[in-house]
Amino acid sequence: MISLGILSATLLLALLLSVRGARRAGASAGARAGGTTSGTTSLEQWSVGNRGFGTILVFMLLAGEIYTTFTFLGGSGWAYGRGAPAFYIIAYGAVAYIMSYWLLPAIWQRATAWKVLSQSEYFTRAYDSPALGNLVAAVSIAALMPYLVLQLKGLGIIVSESSYGAISANAAIWIGTTATVIYVVLAGVKGSAMTAALKDVMVLMCVVGLGIVLPYTLHGGIGPMFARIAAERPDFLTLPSSGLSPSWFASTVVLTVLGFYMWPHTFGSVFTARDASVFRRNAALMPLYQLVLLFVFFIGFAALLSVPGLQGADVDLALLRVTRDTFGPWIVGLVGAAGLLTALVPGSLILMSVATTLARILRPPREGQPAESATFARLLVPLLAGVALLFTFRGGSTLVTLLLMAYSMVTQLFPALLASLFPTARITAAGAMAGIVVGEAAVAATTLGGISMTTLFPGWSHSVTDINAGFLALILNVVTMVLVSRLSSPATATAPAPASV
Protein backbone atom coordinates (compact mmCIF):
# COMPACT_ATOMS: atom_id res chain seq x y z
CA MET A 1 0.00 0.00 0.00
CA ILE A 2 1.42 3.36 -1.05
CA SER A 3 0.42 5.33 2.06
CA LEU A 4 1.80 2.65 4.37
CA GLY A 5 5.09 2.69 2.47
CA ILE A 6 5.39 6.47 2.86
CA LEU A 7 4.70 6.21 6.60
CA SER A 8 7.32 3.47 7.00
CA ALA A 9 9.91 5.39 4.98
CA THR A 10 9.38 8.53 7.04
CA LEU A 11 9.79 6.63 10.30
CA LEU A 12 12.99 5.03 9.00
CA LEU A 13 14.32 8.40 7.88
CA ALA A 14 13.65 9.85 11.34
CA LEU A 15 15.66 7.02 12.90
CA LEU A 16 18.53 7.52 10.43
CA LEU A 17 18.63 11.23 11.24
CA SER A 18 18.81 10.40 14.95
CA VAL A 19 21.72 8.01 14.35
CA ARG A 20 23.50 10.77 12.46
CA GLY A 21 22.86 13.08 15.39
CA ALA A 22 24.27 10.45 17.76
CA ARG A 23 27.48 10.14 15.72
CA ARG A 24 27.95 13.91 15.63
CA ALA A 25 27.32 14.17 19.36
CA GLY A 26 29.76 11.34 20.04
CA ALA A 27 32.42 12.85 17.80
CA SER A 28 32.01 16.23 19.50
CA ALA A 29 32.28 14.69 22.95
CA GLY A 30 35.29 12.66 21.86
CA ALA A 31 37.10 15.74 20.56
CA ARG A 32 36.70 17.46 23.89
CA ALA A 33 37.89 14.34 25.70
CA GLY A 34 41.04 13.97 23.62
CA GLY A 35 39.75 11.74 20.85
CA THR A 36 37.75 9.15 22.78
CA THR A 37 34.10 8.83 21.87
CA SER A 38 33.11 5.86 23.99
CA GLY A 39 31.34 6.60 27.25
CA THR A 40 32.12 10.28 27.39
CA THR A 41 28.75 11.81 26.60
CA SER A 42 27.57 13.81 29.59
CA LEU A 43 24.02 14.64 30.59
CA GLU A 44 24.68 18.20 29.42
CA GLN A 45 25.62 16.94 25.96
CA TRP A 46 22.66 14.53 25.79
CA SER A 47 19.94 16.86 27.09
CA VAL A 48 20.99 20.37 25.98
CA GLY A 49 23.59 19.73 23.26
CA ASN A 50 26.37 21.32 25.33
CA ARG A 51 24.52 24.64 24.99
CA GLY A 52 25.86 25.07 21.47
CA PHE A 53 22.76 25.40 19.27
CA GLY A 54 22.43 28.37 16.96
CA THR A 55 19.37 30.19 15.64
CA ILE A 56 18.23 27.49 13.20
CA LEU A 57 18.46 24.53 15.59
CA VAL A 58 16.79 26.44 18.44
CA PHE A 59 14.09 27.52 15.99
CA MET A 60 13.54 23.88 15.00
CA LEU A 61 13.36 22.75 18.60
CA LEU A 62 10.91 25.42 19.72
CA ALA A 63 8.71 24.85 16.66
CA GLY A 64 9.07 21.10 17.07
CA GLU A 65 7.72 21.26 20.61
CA ILE A 66 4.87 23.66 19.94
CA TYR A 67 3.42 22.19 16.74
CA THR A 68 2.22 18.81 17.97
CA THR A 69 -0.55 16.38 17.13
CA PHE A 70 -2.86 18.68 19.08
CA THR A 71 -2.07 21.49 16.63
CA PHE A 72 -2.15 19.22 13.60
CA LEU A 73 -5.45 17.53 14.46
CA GLY A 74 -6.89 19.82 17.14
CA GLY A 75 -6.41 23.06 15.21
CA SER A 76 -8.42 21.84 12.23
CA GLY A 77 -10.84 20.12 14.62
CA TRP A 78 -11.50 23.34 16.52
CA ALA A 79 -12.06 25.23 13.28
CA TYR A 80 -14.47 22.48 12.19
CA GLY A 81 -16.34 22.23 15.50
CA ARG A 82 -16.14 25.70 17.05
CA GLY A 83 -15.38 28.24 14.36
CA ALA A 84 -14.11 31.68 15.37
CA PRO A 85 -12.94 30.77 18.93
CA ALA A 86 -10.25 28.59 17.33
CA PHE A 87 -8.34 31.72 16.33
CA TYR A 88 -7.15 32.15 19.91
CA ILE A 89 -4.48 29.57 19.00
CA ILE A 90 -2.96 31.98 16.50
CA ALA A 91 -3.21 34.93 18.89
CA TYR A 92 -1.50 33.44 21.93
CA GLY A 93 1.43 32.00 19.99
CA ALA A 94 2.22 35.30 18.29
CA VAL A 95 2.07 37.23 21.58
CA ALA A 96 4.22 34.64 23.36
CA TYR A 97 6.93 34.94 20.70
CA ILE A 98 7.02 38.70 21.23
CA MET A 99 7.38 38.14 24.99
CA SER A 100 10.26 35.74 24.33
CA TYR A 101 12.44 38.63 23.10
CA TRP A 102 12.90 39.72 26.72
CA LEU A 103 12.01 36.59 28.70
CA LEU A 104 14.17 33.89 27.14
CA PRO A 105 17.53 35.73 27.15
CA ALA A 106 17.05 36.46 30.86
CA ILE A 107 16.33 32.79 31.59
CA TRP A 108 19.24 31.67 29.41
CA GLN A 109 21.70 34.00 31.14
CA ARG A 110 20.89 32.61 34.58
CA ALA A 111 20.61 28.98 33.50
CA THR A 112 23.97 29.08 31.69
CA ALA A 113 25.77 30.74 34.60
CA TRP A 114 24.29 28.19 37.01
CA LYS A 115 24.90 25.22 34.63
CA VAL A 116 21.38 23.90 35.16
CA LEU A 117 19.86 21.27 32.87
CA SER A 118 16.20 21.20 33.89
CA GLN A 119 13.42 23.55 34.88
CA SER A 120 13.35 22.28 38.46
CA GLU A 121 17.09 22.92 38.81
CA TYR A 122 16.56 26.49 37.66
CA PHE A 123 14.10 27.14 40.49
CA THR A 124 16.38 25.38 42.98
CA ARG A 125 19.23 27.74 42.12
CA ALA A 126 17.11 30.85 41.73
CA TYR A 127 15.67 30.51 45.25
CA ASP A 128 18.44 28.39 46.80
CA SER A 129 15.79 25.84 47.74
CA PRO A 130 15.92 22.13 46.84
CA ALA A 131 12.40 21.81 48.26
CA LEU A 132 11.07 24.33 45.73
CA GLY A 133 12.95 22.54 42.95
CA ASN A 134 11.36 19.23 43.95
CA LEU A 135 7.91 20.84 44.02
CA VAL A 136 8.44 22.26 40.53
CA ALA A 137 9.65 18.83 39.36
CA ALA A 138 6.48 17.20 40.71
CA VAL A 139 4.28 19.78 38.96
CA SER A 140 6.28 19.40 35.74
CA ILE A 141 6.02 15.62 35.62
CA ALA A 142 2.33 15.65 36.59
CA ALA A 143 1.62 18.05 33.72
CA LEU A 144 3.85 16.38 31.13
CA MET A 145 2.65 12.79 31.39
CA PRO A 146 -0.92 13.47 30.16
CA TYR A 147 0.60 15.71 27.47
CA LEU A 148 2.78 12.80 26.34
CA VAL A 149 -0.25 10.50 26.33
CA LEU A 150 -2.01 13.00 24.08
CA GLN A 151 0.85 12.75 21.55
CA LEU A 152 0.66 8.95 21.60
CA LYS A 153 -3.10 8.89 21.12
CA GLY A 154 -2.80 11.40 18.30
CA LEU A 155 -0.10 9.23 16.74
CA GLY A 156 -2.43 6.24 16.78
CA ILE A 157 -5.25 8.18 15.13
CA ILE A 158 -3.02 9.63 12.40
CA VAL A 159 -1.32 6.38 11.42
CA SER A 160 -4.52 4.31 11.55
CA GLU A 161 -6.47 6.79 9.41
CA SER A 162 -3.72 7.49 6.89
CA SER A 163 -2.89 3.78 6.47
CA TYR A 164 -6.57 3.11 5.69
CA GLY A 165 -6.76 0.85 8.73
CA ALA A 166 -3.83 -1.37 7.69
CA ILE A 167 -2.16 -0.50 11.00
CA SER A 168 -4.37 -0.31 14.07
CA ALA A 169 -4.12 2.67 16.39
CA ASN A 170 -2.65 0.53 19.19
CA ALA A 171 -0.03 -1.01 16.89
CA ALA A 172 0.92 2.46 15.64
CA ILE A 173 1.35 3.68 19.20
CA TRP A 174 3.66 0.76 20.04
CA ILE A 175 5.76 1.24 16.91
CA GLY A 176 5.98 5.03 17.28
CA THR A 177 6.85 4.85 20.98
CA THR A 178 9.58 2.28 20.33
CA ALA A 179 11.10 4.45 17.60
CA THR A 180 10.98 7.50 19.84
CA VAL A 181 12.71 5.67 22.69
CA ILE A 182 15.44 4.46 20.35
CA TYR A 183 16.36 7.86 18.97
CA VAL A 184 16.04 9.61 22.33
CA VAL A 185 18.42 7.11 23.94
CA LEU A 186 20.82 7.26 20.98
CA ALA A 187 21.08 10.96 20.26
CA GLY A 188 19.21 12.96 22.88
CA VAL A 189 18.34 16.52 21.97
CA LYS A 190 20.51 16.43 18.83
CA GLY A 191 18.35 13.67 17.35
CA SER A 192 15.17 15.57 18.23
CA ALA A 193 16.50 18.69 16.50
CA MET A 194 17.37 16.76 13.35
CA THR A 195 13.94 15.11 13.24
CA ALA A 196 12.27 18.47 13.95
CA ALA A 197 13.85 19.86 10.79
CA LEU A 198 12.30 17.05 8.75
CA LYS A 199 8.97 17.59 10.51
CA ASP A 200 8.89 21.31 9.76
CA VAL A 201 9.53 20.75 6.06
CA MET A 202 6.81 18.11 5.80
CA VAL A 203 4.27 20.04 7.87
CA LEU A 204 4.80 23.20 5.82
CA MET A 205 4.49 21.28 2.57
CA CYS A 206 1.36 19.34 3.56
CA VAL A 207 -0.54 21.92 5.59
CA VAL A 208 0.04 24.85 3.25
CA GLY A 209 -0.71 22.67 0.23
CA LEU A 210 -3.94 21.30 1.68
CA GLY A 211 -4.97 24.69 3.05
CA ILE A 212 -4.84 26.14 -0.47
CA VAL A 213 -5.94 23.19 -2.60
CA LEU A 214 -8.90 21.97 -0.53
CA PRO A 215 -10.85 25.27 -0.51
CA TYR A 216 -10.34 25.64 -4.28
CA THR A 217 -11.12 22.01 -5.05
CA LEU A 218 -14.20 21.74 -2.85
CA HIS A 219 -15.58 25.29 -2.83
CA GLY A 220 -14.01 27.24 -5.68
CA GLY A 221 -11.62 29.27 -3.50
CA ILE A 222 -10.99 30.56 0.00
CA GLY A 223 -13.34 33.53 -0.43
CA PRO A 224 -16.24 31.45 -1.76
CA MET A 225 -15.68 28.94 1.04
CA PHE A 226 -16.11 31.62 3.72
CA ALA A 227 -19.05 33.13 1.84
CA ARG A 228 -20.79 29.76 1.88
CA ILE A 229 -20.06 29.26 5.60
CA ALA A 230 -21.40 32.74 6.35
CA ALA A 231 -24.57 31.95 4.40
CA GLU A 232 -25.19 28.49 5.86
CA ARG A 233 -23.78 29.10 9.39
CA PRO A 234 -24.08 32.87 9.94
CA ASP A 235 -22.87 32.78 13.57
CA PHE A 236 -20.00 30.37 12.99
CA LEU A 237 -17.35 32.95 12.16
CA THR A 238 -18.05 35.29 15.10
CA LEU A 239 -17.40 34.90 18.81
CA PRO A 240 -20.61 34.03 20.71
CA SER A 241 -22.03 36.48 23.24
CA SER A 242 -21.63 33.93 26.05
CA GLY A 243 -19.44 30.93 26.69
CA LEU A 244 -16.52 31.22 24.26
CA SER A 245 -17.10 34.96 24.19
CA PRO A 246 -14.64 37.86 23.79
CA SER A 247 -13.98 37.71 27.57
CA TRP A 248 -13.09 34.03 27.30
CA PHE A 249 -10.97 34.71 24.21
CA ALA A 250 -8.91 37.51 25.75
CA SER A 251 -8.42 35.83 29.13
CA THR A 252 -7.48 32.51 27.56
CA VAL A 253 -4.93 34.20 25.31
CA VAL A 254 -3.31 35.92 28.30
CA LEU A 255 -3.19 32.74 30.38
CA THR A 256 -1.74 30.64 27.60
CA VAL A 257 0.85 33.30 26.82
CA LEU A 258 2.03 33.19 30.44
CA GLY A 259 2.20 29.41 30.37
CA PHE A 260 3.67 29.13 26.88
CA TYR A 261 7.30 28.71 27.94
CA MET A 262 6.54 27.07 31.28
CA TRP A 263 6.23 23.60 29.81
CA PRO A 264 9.37 21.87 31.15
CA HIS A 265 10.50 20.57 27.74
CA THR A 266 10.04 24.03 26.18
CA PHE A 267 11.81 25.67 29.13
CA GLY A 268 14.66 23.16 28.79
CA SER A 269 15.15 23.97 25.11
CA VAL A 270 16.21 27.47 26.16
CA PHE A 271 19.34 25.92 27.68
CA THR A 272 20.54 24.61 24.30
CA ALA A 273 21.35 28.04 22.80
CA ARG A 274 24.92 29.24 22.40
CA ASP A 275 24.09 32.90 23.19
CA ALA A 276 21.17 35.20 24.04
CA SER A 277 20.99 36.73 20.56
CA VAL A 278 19.58 33.43 19.29
CA PHE A 279 16.29 34.16 21.05
CA ARG A 280 16.05 37.71 19.78
CA ARG A 281 16.42 36.52 16.20
CA ASN A 282 13.86 33.80 16.82
CA ALA A 283 11.44 36.33 18.32
CA ALA A 284 11.40 38.02 14.91
CA LEU A 285 11.04 34.76 12.97
CA MET A 286 8.67 32.63 15.04
CA PRO A 287 5.50 34.75 14.62
CA LEU A 288 5.72 34.03 10.89
CA TYR A 289 5.35 30.35 11.73
CA GLN A 290 1.91 31.11 13.16
CA LEU A 291 0.75 31.81 9.62
CA VAL A 292 0.89 28.06 9.05
CA LEU A 293 -2.02 27.72 11.44
CA LEU A 294 -4.22 29.73 9.09
CA PHE A 295 -3.92 26.93 6.56
CA VAL A 296 -4.74 24.38 9.28
CA PHE A 297 -7.94 26.33 9.94
CA PHE A 298 -8.71 26.54 6.21
CA ILE A 299 -8.60 22.73 6.13
CA GLY A 300 -11.06 22.53 9.03
CA PHE A 301 -13.41 25.05 7.42
CA ALA A 302 -13.24 23.20 4.09
CA ALA A 303 -14.10 19.93 5.85
CA LEU A 304 -17.06 21.54 7.65
CA LEU A 305 -19.08 21.71 4.46
CA SER A 306 -17.70 18.57 2.80
CA VAL A 307 -17.47 16.05 5.66
CA PRO A 308 -20.42 17.04 7.83
CA GLY A 309 -21.62 15.19 10.89
CA LEU A 310 -18.41 14.78 12.93
CA GLN A 311 -19.28 15.19 16.60
CA GLY A 312 -17.42 15.23 19.91
CA ALA A 313 -13.89 13.86 19.76
CA ASP A 314 -14.39 12.88 16.11
CA VAL A 315 -14.00 16.52 15.03
CA ASP A 316 -10.25 15.95 15.36
CA LEU A 317 -10.53 13.58 12.39
CA ALA A 318 -11.63 16.42 10.09
CA LEU A 319 -8.21 16.92 8.46
CA LEU A 320 -7.61 13.24 7.80
CA ARG A 321 -11.16 12.49 6.64
CA VAL A 322 -11.36 15.33 4.14
CA THR A 323 -7.90 14.42 2.82
CA ARG A 324 -8.89 10.77 2.35
CA ASP A 325 -12.15 11.72 0.64
CA THR A 326 -10.48 14.17 -1.74
CA PHE A 327 -7.06 12.77 -2.64
CA GLY A 328 -5.33 9.49 -3.40
CA PRO A 329 -3.01 7.41 -1.21
CA TRP A 330 0.13 9.37 -2.14
CA ILE A 331 -1.19 12.58 -0.60
CA VAL A 332 -2.80 10.74 2.29
CA GLY A 333 0.53 9.03 3.02
CA LEU A 334 2.45 12.31 2.99
CA VAL A 335 -0.08 13.98 5.30
CA GLY A 336 0.02 10.99 7.63
CA ALA A 337 3.83 11.06 7.65
CA ALA A 338 3.85 14.76 8.61
CA GLY A 339 1.35 14.01 11.37
CA LEU A 340 3.51 11.12 12.54
CA LEU A 341 6.43 13.48 13.07
CA THR A 342 4.26 15.98 14.98
CA ALA A 343 3.89 13.22 17.57
CA LEU A 344 7.47 11.91 17.58
CA VAL A 345 9.31 15.22 17.99
CA PRO A 346 7.44 16.65 21.01
CA GLY A 347 7.14 13.13 22.44
CA SER A 348 10.91 12.75 22.38
CA LEU A 349 11.46 16.14 24.02
CA ILE A 350 8.93 15.34 26.75
CA LEU A 351 10.62 12.01 27.50
CA MET A 352 14.02 13.71 27.59
CA SER A 353 12.79 16.49 29.87
CA VAL A 354 11.23 14.13 32.41
CA ALA A 355 14.24 11.77 32.33
CA THR A 356 16.68 14.66 32.84
CA THR A 357 14.64 16.07 35.72
CA LEU A 358 14.46 12.72 37.51
CA ALA A 359 18.13 11.91 36.83
CA ARG A 360 19.31 15.18 38.40
CA ILE A 361 17.18 14.51 41.48
CA LEU A 362 17.73 10.76 41.91
CA ARG A 363 21.33 10.59 40.67
CA PRO A 364 23.07 13.96 41.18
CA PRO A 365 26.24 14.40 39.09
CA ARG A 366 29.56 13.47 40.69
CA GLU A 367 32.89 15.05 39.91
CA GLY A 368 34.86 13.02 37.40
CA GLN A 369 31.82 11.00 36.29
CA PRO A 370 30.37 13.02 33.36
CA ALA A 371 28.55 10.08 31.78
CA GLU A 372 26.99 8.57 34.91
CA SER A 373 23.94 10.83 35.06
CA ALA A 374 23.45 10.59 31.30
CA THR A 375 23.43 6.80 31.46
CA PHE A 376 20.89 6.86 34.27
CA ALA A 377 18.68 9.31 32.35
CA ARG A 378 18.82 7.08 29.27
CA LEU A 379 17.77 4.08 31.36
CA LEU A 380 14.78 6.06 32.59
CA VAL A 381 13.51 6.78 29.06
CA PRO A 382 12.04 3.32 28.29
CA LEU A 383 10.56 3.13 31.80
CA LEU A 384 8.82 6.48 31.37
CA ALA A 385 7.62 5.44 27.93
CA GLY A 386 6.15 2.32 29.47
CA VAL A 387 4.22 4.38 32.03
CA ALA A 388 2.91 6.61 29.24
CA LEU A 389 1.79 3.56 27.26
CA LEU A 390 -0.06 2.24 30.31
CA PHE A 391 -2.00 5.48 30.65
CA THR A 392 -2.57 5.64 26.90
CA PHE A 393 -4.23 2.23 26.77
CA ARG A 394 -5.97 2.31 30.16
CA GLY A 395 -6.33 5.98 31.01
CA GLY A 396 -9.92 6.30 29.86
CA SER A 397 -11.85 9.48 29.21
CA THR A 398 -10.49 11.28 32.29
CA LEU A 399 -7.36 12.01 30.26
CA VAL A 400 -9.12 14.95 28.57
CA THR A 401 -9.80 16.53 31.96
CA LEU A 402 -6.20 15.97 33.03
CA LEU A 403 -4.92 17.51 29.79
CA LEU A 404 -7.02 20.63 30.25
CA MET A 405 -5.66 20.89 33.78
CA ALA A 406 -2.04 20.43 32.65
CA TYR A 407 -1.73 23.82 30.93
CA SER A 408 -3.19 25.60 33.95
CA MET A 409 -0.77 23.65 36.16
CA VAL A 410 2.40 24.82 34.41
CA THR A 411 1.08 28.39 34.20
CA GLN A 412 1.14 28.52 38.01
CA LEU A 413 4.95 28.45 37.83
CA PHE A 414 5.11 31.76 35.95
CA PRO A 415 4.78 34.19 38.92
CA ALA A 416 7.73 32.57 40.70
CA LEU A 417 9.74 32.57 37.47
CA LEU A 418 9.03 36.25 36.87
CA ALA A 419 10.04 37.09 40.44
CA SER A 420 13.33 35.24 39.96
CA LEU A 421 14.31 37.57 37.11
CA PHE A 422 14.38 40.70 39.29
CA PRO A 423 17.49 40.89 41.51
CA THR A 424 15.86 43.21 44.05
CA ALA A 425 12.67 41.14 44.43
CA ARG A 426 11.85 40.00 47.95
CA ILE A 427 9.97 36.87 47.00
CA THR A 428 11.13 34.01 49.20
CA ALA A 429 11.31 30.30 48.54
CA ALA A 430 8.53 29.77 51.08
CA GLY A 431 6.42 32.38 49.31
CA ALA A 432 7.03 30.84 45.89
CA MET A 433 6.15 27.37 47.19
CA ALA A 434 3.01 28.56 48.95
CA GLY A 435 1.86 30.42 45.84
CA ILE A 436 2.38 27.39 43.62
CA VAL A 437 0.57 25.06 46.04
CA VAL A 438 -2.42 27.40 46.38
CA GLY A 439 -2.52 27.98 42.62
CA GLU A 440 -2.41 24.26 41.86
CA ALA A 441 -5.13 23.58 44.45
CA ALA A 442 -7.33 26.19 42.79
CA VAL A 443 -6.66 24.61 39.38
CA ALA A 444 -7.70 21.21 40.72
CA ALA A 445 -10.87 22.67 42.26
CA THR A 446 -11.93 24.46 39.07
CA THR A 447 -10.98 21.65 36.69
CA LEU A 448 -11.74 18.45 38.59
CA GLY A 449 -14.29 19.87 41.01
CA GLY A 450 -16.44 21.48 38.33
CA ILE A 451 -16.22 24.94 39.92
CA SER A 452 -16.52 27.72 37.36
CA MET A 453 -16.70 31.49 37.32
CA THR A 454 -20.47 31.15 36.88
CA THR A 455 -20.83 29.10 40.07
CA LEU A 456 -18.58 31.50 41.97
CA PHE A 457 -20.30 34.64 40.69
CA PRO A 458 -23.91 33.71 39.88
CA GLY A 459 -25.95 36.41 38.23
CA TRP A 460 -22.90 38.38 37.11
CA SER A 461 -22.44 39.57 33.53
CA HIS A 462 -21.01 37.18 30.94
CA SER A 463 -18.11 39.59 30.55
CA VAL A 464 -17.04 38.38 34.02
CA THR A 465 -18.31 34.80 34.21
CA ASP A 466 -16.81 33.87 30.84
CA ILE A 467 -13.30 34.81 31.98
CA ASN A 468 -11.06 31.74 32.07
CA ALA A 469 -11.21 30.29 35.59
CA GLY A 470 -7.43 29.89 35.50
CA PHE A 471 -7.22 33.62 36.24
CA LEU A 472 -8.66 33.00 39.69
CA ALA A 473 -5.96 30.43 40.40
CA LEU A 474 -3.26 32.81 39.17
CA ILE A 475 -4.55 35.69 41.33
CA LEU A 476 -4.65 33.46 44.42
CA ASN A 477 -1.13 32.29 43.58
CA VAL A 478 0.30 35.82 43.38
CA VAL A 479 -1.49 37.06 46.52
CA THR A 480 -0.30 34.05 48.53
CA MET A 481 3.25 34.35 47.20
CA VAL A 482 3.51 38.00 48.21
CA LEU A 483 1.90 37.57 51.65
CA VAL A 484 4.00 34.55 52.64
CA SER A 485 7.15 36.26 51.35
CA ARG A 486 6.40 39.25 53.59
CA LEU A 487 6.08 36.94 56.58
CA SER A 488 9.07 34.70 55.85
CA SER A 489 12.76 35.39 56.23
CA PRO A 490 14.30 37.70 53.59
CA ALA A 491 17.39 35.50 53.72
CA THR A 492 15.62 33.07 51.42
CA ALA A 493 14.63 35.64 48.82
CA THR A 494 15.39 35.19 45.16
CA ALA A 495 19.08 34.89 44.29
CA PRO A 496 20.76 37.85 42.61
CA ALA A 497 21.13 37.69 38.86
CA PRO A 498 24.48 36.26 37.75
CA ALA A 499 26.95 38.32 35.82
CA SER A 500 26.56 38.35 32.06
CA VAL A 501 27.95 35.28 30.32
Image: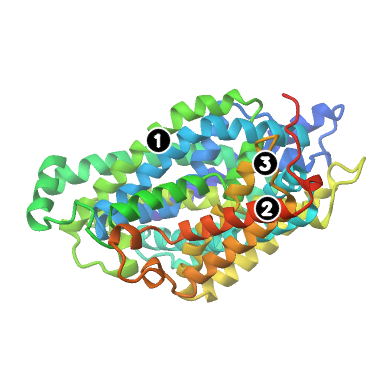
- Say which residue appears at 29% left-offset and 52% top-offset: 246
Q: CA distance from mark 1 to mark 2?
A: 34 Å
Q: Residues within 10 Å of mark 2 (few under 14, many from 20)?
A: many
Q: Label for residue 432?
A: 2
The amino acid on which the numbered mark 2 sits, given as a three-letter code, is Ala
Disc 2 secondary structure class: helix
The quadrant of the rendering that contains the N terminus is bottom left
User: Can you give x and y, in whole percent of width and height, for residue 273 in the image?
Assistant: 64, 31
Q: Which residue is mark 1?
A: 289
Query: Can the viewer see residue 10 in this picture?
Result: yes
Give the labeled residue for mark 3: 420
Residue 90's mark?
none
In the foreground, 20 or 42: 42
The CA distance from mark 3 to mark 1 is 30 Å
Q: Residue at x 13, y 47 (%)?
A: 225
Q: Name the spot of residue 326 as percent of width and height, x first.
A: 21, 52
Taking the view exactly as shown, the residue that stands out farthest to the right is 368
Look at the numbered disc 3 and give the secondary structure of its residue. helix
Quadrant of the rendering where the C terminus is positioned: top right
Of residues 12 and 366, the one drawn nearer to the viewer in this rendering = 366
Taking the image as drawn, is residue 378 in sight? no
Would you place residue 242 above or below residue 107 in this image? below
